[in-house]
Amino acid sequence: MFGMELTRQTPQANWPMPGAIVALLKPITWFPPMWAYACGAISTGHGMDGRLGFIFLGVLLAGPLLCGTSQAVNDWFDRHVDAINEPDRVIPSGRMPGQWGLYISIIMSALSLVVAGLMGTFIFAAALLGLAFAWAYSAPPFRFKQNGWLGNGVVGFSYETLPWLTAATAMTGLVPEAPIWIVALLYGLGAHGILTLNDFKAIAGDKEMGIRTLPVLHGERSAALIACAVMTVAQAGVVVTLWMLGLPVYALAILFVLLLQMVCMVRFARNPVRFAVWYSAIGVGLYVTGMMITAFGLRTLVPAIS
């Protein structure tokens, strides 16, 4: 009898547990688009009167919905790779049974479009573009993630530029003015370099799986220099933009934040694999601080750009 008890198997659940759904959507990854959304809202200089509903829906759209969808889609189409490299992840571990990873990706995509539709045509179009990028990044036949130049650019645009522009539209009900477009695009470009930082931890696995990240394509040191150059050029563009808009104090503040990052970049570039996580903690913190400084600078221009 004892032997028979040992051979009994607990049937696998047909439904995912709430904890498994949360793990699939990865709340920790929601910060970048939600931060960019906050920056976009602040940059308009508009108060919250009468827009609280749009602000709430926008935060929901940027973080749990669109970003959560992108994480679910990525995990579903990477499930075979994760079964080898990260078997404890929610899908290969069996905590997300059957095809529920795909079902949740589809459900979250639909919810995203419903919420975006409630916020207006421009925001719906932005959400539709973001979803298209999320699926094309991970799913065949496109799988943008297989090329570091293209994949990181798509994610940077989706995580920084789109939320910033979406928030600006949600706050004003209008298509954003040119200065907001410019800084949103520049910070999305700079995020390309930030995303390269994540690629140094899995170089061997990426080579084996044919994923051509920048470290795989160009080597560790060259990829680090490219990432630093992209982040530097993007923020230098913000400095120039703010200066030309008549905001020298804010421009100098961004320049100071950039110089601090450049000091950290020297150490990172010497040993990218060892210091990528370290730079992510310090350098990225300075980068997002600059985003908020820029947002408050643009806020002072409301009478001029309205």
Image (tube, rainbow, N blue to C red):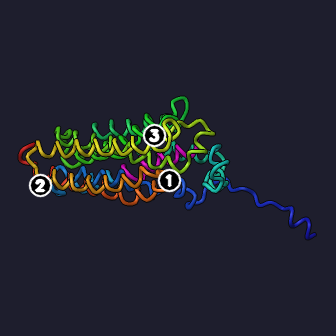
Separation (CA) of disc 2 from disc 3: 37 Å
In the rendered image, residue 232, in percent from the top left (x then y), is placed at: 29, 45
Tag 2: Cα neighbours inside 10 Å, few (<14), some, or many (≥20)? Answer: few
**Could you say which quadrant of the image residue 183 lies in?**
top left
Vertical side of 211 occupied by 267: above or below: below
Q: Residue furthest front?
A: 270
Tag 1: Cα neighbours inside 10 Å, few (<14), some, or many (≥20)? Answer: many
Q: What residue is pinned by disc 3?
A: 134
69 falls in the magenta region = yes
In the rendered image, residue 304, in percent from the top left (x then y), is placed at: 6, 44
Q: What residue is pinned by disc 1?
A: 25
Q: Taking 15 as reference, is 52 left or right? A: left
Instruction: Give residue 145's mark.
Output: none
Question: Mark 2: which secondary structure?
Answer: helix
Q: Mark 2 or 1, which is nearer the eye?
A: 2
Name the residue at 47% across, 39% down.
Answer: 214
Mark closest to the chain's N terminus, 2 or 1: 1
Residue 171 in sight from this viewpoint: yes
Quadrant of the image containing the C terminus = top left
Q: What secondary structure predominates along the stretch shown in magenta?
A: helix
Question: Mark 1: which secondary structure?
Answer: helix
Return the residue nearer the eye: 203 or 146: 203
Mark closest to the chain's N terminus, 2 or 3: 3
In the rendered image, residue 202, in percent from the top left (x then y), is placed at: 56, 48
Q: Which residues are magenta?
A: 60-78
Quadrant of the image containing the N terminus = bottom right
Instruction: Give residue 249's mark.
Output: 2
Q: Taking 172 as reference, is 2 left or right? A: right
Q: Amino acid at mark 2?
A: Val
Residue 117 in sight from this viewpoint: no
Return the residue nearer the eye: 82 or 283: 283
